[in-house]
Image (cartoon, coloured by chain):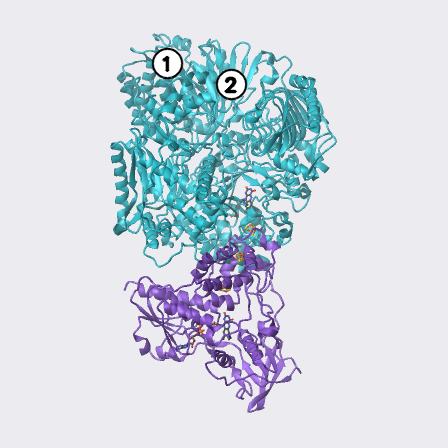
Chain colours: A purple, B cyan
Amino acid sequence: MGELGAFKTIARANTPERPAAERVGDHREFVRTLPLVELREQGARCMECGVPFCHNGCPLGNLIPDWNDLVYRDRFREALDQLHRTNNFPEFTGRLCPAPCEAACVLEIDEGNAVTIKQIELAIVDRGWEEGWIPAQPPRMRTGRSVAVVGSGPAGLACAQQLARAGHDVTVFERDEAAGGLLRFGVPDFKIEKHVVERRVQQLAAEGVRFECGVEIKSQEQLDAFDAAVLATGARVPRDLPVPGRELGGVHFAMEYLYERNRAVAGSAEPTISAAGRHVVVIGGGDTGADCVASAHREGAASVTQIELVGEPPPSRQDDLTPWPLWPMKLRTSYALKEGGDRSFAISTTGLSGNGRVQEIHWVRNTGEPPFDPVPTSDESHPAQLVLLAMGFVGPETALLETLDVTLDKSSYATSVPGIFAAGDARRGQSLIVWAIEEGRRCATAVDAWLTAPA
Amino acid sequence: MPLPNRQSGLYDPSFEHDACGVAFVARLNGDASHETVERALTALANLEHRGAAGADKNTGDGAGILLQIPDEFFRAQIAGLPPAGAYGVGTCFGGHEETIEAAVAAEGQELVCWRDVPVDETHVGRTARAAMPQIRQFVVAARGLEGDAFERKLYVIRRVAELAAGPALVIPSLSSRTLVYKGMLTAPQLARFYPDLLDHRFESALALVHSRFSTNTFPSWELAHPYRMVAHNGEINTLRGNVNWMRARESQLASELFGDDLAKVLPVIREGGSDTATFDNVLELLVLAGRSLPHAVMMMIPEANPSEELKGFYAYHGCLMEAWDGPAAIAFTDGRVIGATLDRNGLRPGRWYQTSDGWVVLASETGVLDDAPESIVRKGRLQPGKLFLVDLEQHRIVPDQEVKAAIATRRPYAKWFQQEALNLSDLPAATMPQRDEEPLLRRQLLFGYAQEDMKVMLAPLARNAEEAVGSMGNDTPLAVLSERKPLLYSYFKQLFAQVTNPPIDSIREAIVMSVSASVGSERNLLAETPEHARQLVMENPILRDEELERLRQVDSDVFASHTIDTTWDVAEGTDGFEPALDRICTEASAALARGANILILSDRAAGRERVPIPSLLAIGAVHHHLVREGTRLQTGIVVESGEPRSVHSIAVLIGYGAAAVNPYVMLETLEELVDLGWLPVGMTVEEAQSRAVKGIGKGLLKVISKMGISTIPSYCGAQIFEAVGLAPELIERCFTGTPSRIGGIGLREIAEGSVARHARAYPGNGGLLPVLGLYAWRRDGEHHQWNPDTISLLQHAVRSGSFETFEQYSDTANAESARRSSLRGLLKFRFPEDGIPLEEVEPVAEIVKRFSTGAMSLGSISREAHETLAKAMNQIGGRSNTGEGGEDSARFEDNRRSKIKQVASGRFGVNANYLANADELQIKMAQGAKPGEGGQLPGHKVDHYIASVRMTTPGVGLISPPPHHDIYSIEDLKQLIYDLRCANPDARISVKLVAEVGVGTVAAGVAKAGADHVLISGHDGGTGASPVSSILHAGVPWEIGLAETQQTLVRNDLRSRIWVQTDGQLKTGRDVVVAALLGADEMGFATAPLIASGCVMMRACHLNTCPVGIATQDPDLRKKFAGEPEHVVNFFFFVAEEVRRLMAKLGVARFDDLVGRVDLLDADEALTAWQARGIDLSNILRAPEGSPLRRTHAQEPALTDALDWKLLEIEEGDFAIRNVNRTVGGILSHHVTKAHGAPGLPPASIRLTFHGSAGQSFGAWLAPGIELTLVGDANDYVGKGLSGGVLALRPPEGSPFRAEENVIAGNTILYGATSGRAFFRGLVGERFAVRNSGAIAVAEGVGDHGCEYMTGGVVVVLGPTGRNFAAGMSGGIAYVLDEDGRFAERCNTQLVALDELESDDLRLVQSLLEEHLARTGSAVAERVLGDWPGPFVKVMPHEYRRAIEDGAISTGGDGFYTRETEEAAA
Ligand SMILES: Cc1cc2nc3c(=O)[nH]c(=O)nc-3n(C[C@H](O)[C@H](O)[C@H](O)COP(=O)(O)OP(=O)(O)OC[C@H]3O[C@@H](n4cnc5c(N)ncnc54)[C@H](O)[C@@H]3O)c2cc1C
Ligand SMILES: Cc1cc2nc3c(=O)[nH]c(=O)nc-3n(C[C@H](O)[C@H](O)[C@H](O)COP(=O)(O)O)c2cc1C
Ligand code: SF4
Ligand code: SF4
Ligand code: F3S
């Protein structure tokens, strides 16, 4: 129980960020942490609710009230234990999670007042790493059963860690050159520096997880040696934009661009796509789009514009549509736009034009709601030398599924093939890291039960 | 022939309660006369209102008389009668002549003759007549025996005959000295029924009479009082334990006086007897075996805190027998002395006087006989723990001290005790064994520890030395339905006192409480030797490790310990469990055979290889095994276990026979908490442990005091629990006699639980304790019915007005929640093939009228929330409830008026005006979340508004006492109902009870007491603040309580006159329909409407930080309240709509026709999981025999012969009054209030004078402008709820006695008075001015607990006070004339300071004395004023002083303190 009534006297402190002007100059994380004293004050605001809606709002079921209180009482070590009970990688979620927990926090009934759960989560785990409280936890006994985990995104990693700790032999296959999935190659460094990911991967390795990077699973044979396999391959097929000019140079899927940027920052490959000095248009108003906007800023784009099909959401929670504790549909301004760039809502792209390479984008304003009828005489054209398509993903790549003859099941971690399981975006469609971890954990439980079930 | 009481469904006659009126008349000179009998019968008739009749109003609950054998009477009829004393007369119900004759012959005595007792049954009620036995007398002539020896022989004859004939033969008396006439009669019927009693030759020097009020629902002639030696008003709370212990004692009984005869009388206790009958059985044995009657009485009802001289006596006898504890006024006689005693807390009334011509009369009330005032030379009252004894051989009243001193010095008891008893702390320090133990975490897992145990229970316990407090109800599954295999403790629900006996305030009345305990072996009860005192005494039943080692290592010729391992080999799996249990029992027997007298049941050996048997199972098994074997008293049993860790767990262990408990893992866990920084900085392990031990000790006292028990030894083995979810065989073996009504799990499932916990502890890769989620919802923890889904769906539904969303909510609530947690979830409807069209079903608007919101006090919830509920309920025609905190009178006139006005023990805001503005007055006896407990509103929550509504002082904390101080028994409840009827003849009167075993019989009592409505609350209902253990572990589900109530009421045709409501976790239309089918007409909802208004189950209600402005008084937070009446209205309409749809499917058009139709319910076999757990709902689904199933007519009018009707039109006048004139001034005040509102009439507008003895509640709720003067004396409850009127009581002019030395009025005077003045010339009883919040009073001496819980007003005491003055007094001022300078010793200074008077005070007291003198002619006042100022002490509560300093109260010009409230302004 935090401090009685502290929520009345202590205001919510939003996550401190480095000044926009400064951070666009580098690729280091833009988020800062609160000083310890203030952080503990924030912990004090938590009322340890009888029904902690935050804990329900968090897909992982993080024991938020418990660790909030521990932070308030400066018991970081125990807080870390509680945090790790439900979350294998708090340093990922603490950085990257949109924090549905906060939307559901009881204090958020009074909008804008939620406990700063995510910051506290991050502070706990960062402190843990700093203090060396996060050693490898190799299992005490081994089962002698083996599992292949395909894909090393957060779902694959969480699943692998859980299985390894239960004593199974786990091998993670990753087609990219390094483990981490979208965390490594999708999400830019200024949101999560890659050593953070690597550190965790190393812990897994130390717990006995074998990583086979640069290996793409394409056939059944590759999996034959294993007692079970988990497909955590993500939902990587992007949604395309079928408009005239789509084929022009300088029109890319967001992921192509972001993969390149990540490799560039890591110094592992020379980029082929560049935003430097160009007018950049990002199509799609979501988080992927925002990462593109921010990356373009850092490259020194001439201008960055983000456009969104859907109309501008209301500025605050609509209690008739998405009442507390539901995730509210409301206008959120991304960190990227705070760094610069324009944003427009209710825009339907009608075409791209240029001479081999894209030069202009053409659009029309729409009603903002399905079926997005165009507003007459609202056509506009804008310069666009790099167009990034960030309109979401339609689902997992199908090749492997077909090869293995596997049908995925939304209601179960098992698939149509006994011994083959699926988790993460591959199973539930494009989602969030926090969900990926939860899926990985639950899938591990299912695999473990399957492996240990009496024959 | 009396029908044997028959158990059926949930109805069980063993839970009958009785209470009553009792009186005796004795002639000091010992001359027998018929006048004694006449007087006694008159007294009895005048006590009739304390008795009761059943559905058939001519059938009384019982009346009877005990007197000396009228020798002349018998001699005239029976030829050849031996001389007086050489024959005995037996009265016998039910034939069996041959059996009796055989017994007489076998015992070598001679049967002289049989006599048919003439009876006249013409006036007797239908039911009584049907059950009437044949009544005959027989005369036995002594052969070779005389005196006591002959009495003993007659006793043996009786027992032999009774045992041979079985329950069908009842012998109310068989003695050469006394004779009993009794029956299932009303008081006035007794003499008409037994013409013998009217015969002038029927003479006696003493007569004891009794009029019974029983919750009794089954006809019985046997259960009428008096028994052979006693008549009783009250209830023995510890009965079950006493009976068990007596049974255990029997094998050791030996008596030189009885010799071999003793074996013939065993068992001593007659099966199926009431508490009094059982008491009588034991008392009789003690006396016949050689102790004097007063001696035996002192043993059974010891005094609390006796004087130094008696301490040794009581300590010694405490080693022989535990106390028979409970509210008791016991009148006793052996035909030579007659007397009475009162329980240690003075919970029953008893008044006596002596006349100049040598009559002594004692009765539950004063005024039962018309002796001329001039002839009365002394008056007094029974006092807590004191004996009142009339010795007809010595021709005098023997003072308490004298009797007791004589008995206490018969033998050197004190010395024996000192020499033989050992104190644990005197034992040599023990060497602590080196233990090679598993890490703490493993052991915690082994014993089922969870994180929450640390955080929610243990840390607060050590921090505050008090049990943790929580809020809102228990929405988790019953233990037997939980998937988490809860510990065995949680299958046991604490029982509590409601109506039939009062709980005790273990904090404020700590003087009567004690936690000390002892172990050792007990010896023959019928002898007394120094060795009897060989007991090892412990200050506290919770032992630290070192203390346990001392016990274990005790090395003397007296004590020998033996430790029994209560673990078994994990390799044997669950199969090893039962053999292990057998082994433990066998080992216990063997150890006793070898001379052990301290058995330690230890699970220390638990670990990787050994699984611990649940400690409760181990103690239960061993205890009952030894009881059955007859060896139980040779040893004390101590539990050394890692499992217990809460007040509840330790309470259950003690309740099943543990003398002490060493909860070693808990103690170690406290160490861990210190290491982990869970406790305040600087707290050492030592401190943490001792605080926790202290906290549990306090908690234990609270648990036992809930049942009205005050000492641990009398709680030990008393089994005051109801099991929910345990199989009958298991109960039979280990918890014999414990009610368990829905079957449940057995040994196998318990073993599985133990093995599962072991598996969790070993080998396991994990390293953390489970979360649990019992106290607060956790995703992977225990299921909660109110969870994020149900809460948000309900809120979305009522805010958007979407029935669709509501259906989603109710589907979730029904399917997900109820099924997994509650009994109703296990039921299904039996839908007929075709229902009826929805249109034919009663409209929603009609159905919602049956709904009410729960009592929630303003104070526990905010003004905004409170008013929202009221507006909503008024809008839909339902009812809202004020709760126990009063209501702003501004609301009486508008849509914020609550139709139900609650009257709780605190009586906050209860005055004539409040009562007059109700449609329903609800007497709160208990609340599901804290039955048997009081409450506390801390000063900081009492702002100006709350204070004004409660009529108390801002900033001054308020305490609600655990009992209503005017309800210690059922006849008291009847009186309060009567008082409330007077205060508002139009309102219906409701009584709120909580489900527990026996609630059906209590409800029957409530119906007989004249209530219109009874509410059966489930154990799981909400609360603003309660100890966590009470929220979880007290009471049972309403499904059981409601079904029991319905079955009991219907079979006795009482259902027809009373409405039944139920509440507790009601959420959906389905819940409502199940409740209706089980017998409820109406339903109450508290939590659900709060959730509809925004509550999110924060459960911070007790912390004042409710974030949605509901359970808070914080102005900033209250602004956040966003609930609208509309939301609440939607909720109720939605629920009603669901009800309609179900009704259509059930084919029932009118709700009325739904009520009680259990045939439409069935157990849902689809749910196999619970079937596997052995649950059997057939008792709940039993259709009662009889009809109607719902209320069909009103109660008999109660007020028709009230004296008040004569007073209505008069402004001044004189009236004769007697004890049957009750609540005089009540109806009058109602009329004044109706006409003039709260301000009433100008001072002295109505002035009435009464002559005689006033009945109870004289001047209750007296309104402003009315002045009543009583010349004579008064009974209990004078000036109850005084609302502005003025009372003056003085003795008649010609009284020869000194007024200030004699009793003028009884107990509990000015209870809950809010304003007005009262003057008493003479002594008054216990609890004078209890919970007074504004009245001004003067008395000339008060009993114990004076000014208890007072919050305002002024009291002047011009004479002695009893003990514990000012307990819980948070406000007001008392001035005590301390002439012996010893007042400080008798004052409880927890909350008050004793000061000198300042000039303002002196002026105030002086003016009050002047008024006292003027109104009563007081000699004391005159003397003190003449010698002004006199040695006054001012009793000033600390908080009150602060409030005065803060300006919340100011002194007016006249020296009176006035509150800055609306009241004062008005
Ligand atoms: C740009 C971007 C930014 C995002 N930002 C956030 C954010 O801030 N917060 C948030 O919560 N979520 C964010 N998300 C979503 C989040 O990254 C994903 O939901 C999450 O990473 C899904 O995890 P996963 O393990 O299921 O799949 P992925 O992370 O997609 O990992 C799948 C892995 O499988 C590998 N793989 C696929 N097929 C094979 C194969 N046949 N053989 C071997 N390896 C294979 C892939 O190379 C990849 O490494 C973002 C997504 C994007 C695209
Ligand atoms: C905040 C709160 C305060 C309460 N106060 C009282 C009270 O003053 N008197 C009373 O008899 N019951 C009180 N109760 C109990 C309710 O009247 C009711 O019996 C119970 O809550 C019904 O169960 P439910 O809440 O599950 O509907 C209170 C309950 C709550 C939630
Ligand atoms: S993982 Fe996300 S939702 Fe869960 S606690 Fe952390 S920030 Fe909140
Ligand atoms: S909902 Fe908010 S206040 Fe409540 S426990 Fe969670 S974080 Fe704390
Ligand atoms: S549980 Fe109590 S604290 Fe408020 S949110 Fe509900 S009223």
Residue type, label 2: Leu
* Residue at the image point whose x is 29% and y is 74% from the top: A225
Which image quadrant: the C terminus of chain A?
A: bottom left
Figure quadrant of residue B943: top right
Residue B140 x %, y %: 33, 14
Residue B1104 x %, y %: 58, 48
Q: In the figure, is residue B721 to the left or right of B1299?
A: left
Figure quadrant of residue B941: top right
Letter of the chain that mark 1 sits on in the rendering: B
Q: How packed is label 2: few (under 14 Cα within 10 Å), some, or many (20 or more)? A: many
What residue is pinned by disc 1?
Answer: B176
Marks 1 and 2 share the same chain: yes
Residue type, label 1: Ser
Mark 1 vs mark 2: which is more N-terminal? Answer: 1
When the figure is inspected, residue B478 is found, relative to residue B1400, above or below; the finding is below
Q: Which disc is residue B362 wearing? A: 2
Beta carbon of the mark 1 residue lies under 8 A of ligand 2: no
